[in-house]
Image (cartoon, rainbow, N blue to C red):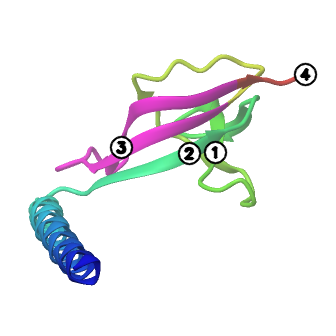
Amino acid sequence: MNKVIVGVIATASVFFASCKTEHKNEAKVAEDLIEETLVQEELTTDELEDIVTLFIASEKADCAGVAEMKCLLVRETEDMPWELMYDPIEGFTYEPGYEYSLEIKRETVANPPADGSSIRYILVREISKIKKN
């Protein structure tokens, strides 16, 4: 009798475990489908909307745009060399002496002026701000 009860309990356990796994799989499929739909909607927009992380150096560098000026030194990864950034980052206030890690949104500019950039940079969030000596 005990063997029969143990067998029934074991069979029921397997049955309920498989039902639970099946529901998890259905939920995961639905979640993946929603995410894929959102990604496809993003990719069908006409403008470039690119979110990147930029590292900003603690000092600006001399550069020449329309006139002599100071430019941010930026890079997208910590092992890349610093590059001059001539354009401002909307929503970002630079303080000398701090290195920043920023999440930036890049958008294309429709009909940019002849002497202007075709890309607009917008601060999404400040990831870090570290004081340098």
CB under 8 Å between discs 4 and 1: no
**Disc number at residue 54?**
2
The answer to whether 102 is drawn above or below residue 82 in the figure is above
Q: Which residue was labeled with disc 3? A: 105
Residue 115 seen by the camera = no
Gap between marks 3 and 2 measured at Cα: 10 Å
**Disc number at residue 62?**
none
Quick one: label 4, few (<14), some, or many (20+) residues within 10 Å? few
**Disc number at residue 133?**
4
Provide the secondary structure element on which disc 2 rests: strand
Q: What kind of residue is marked 4?
A: Asn
- Viewer-nearest residue: 129 or 37: 37
Q: Of the residues tagged 3 and 1, which is closer to the observer?
A: 3
Provide the secondary structure element on which disc 3 rests: strand
CB under 8 Å between discs 4 and 2: no
CB under 8 Å between discs 1 and 2: yes
The answer to whether 33 is drawn above or below residue 130 in the figure is below
In the image, the segment drawn in magenta is 100-129
Gap between marks 1 and 2 measured at Cα: 6 Å
- Residue 39 location (% of width, % of height): 18, 63
Q: Quadrant of the C terminus?
A: top right
Q: Which residue was labeled with disc 1? A: 74
Q: Earlier in the sequence, mark 4 or mark 1?
A: 1
- Residue 69 location (% of width, % of height): 63, 29
Residue 98 seen by the camera = yes
- Residue 30 location (% of width, % of height): 9, 65
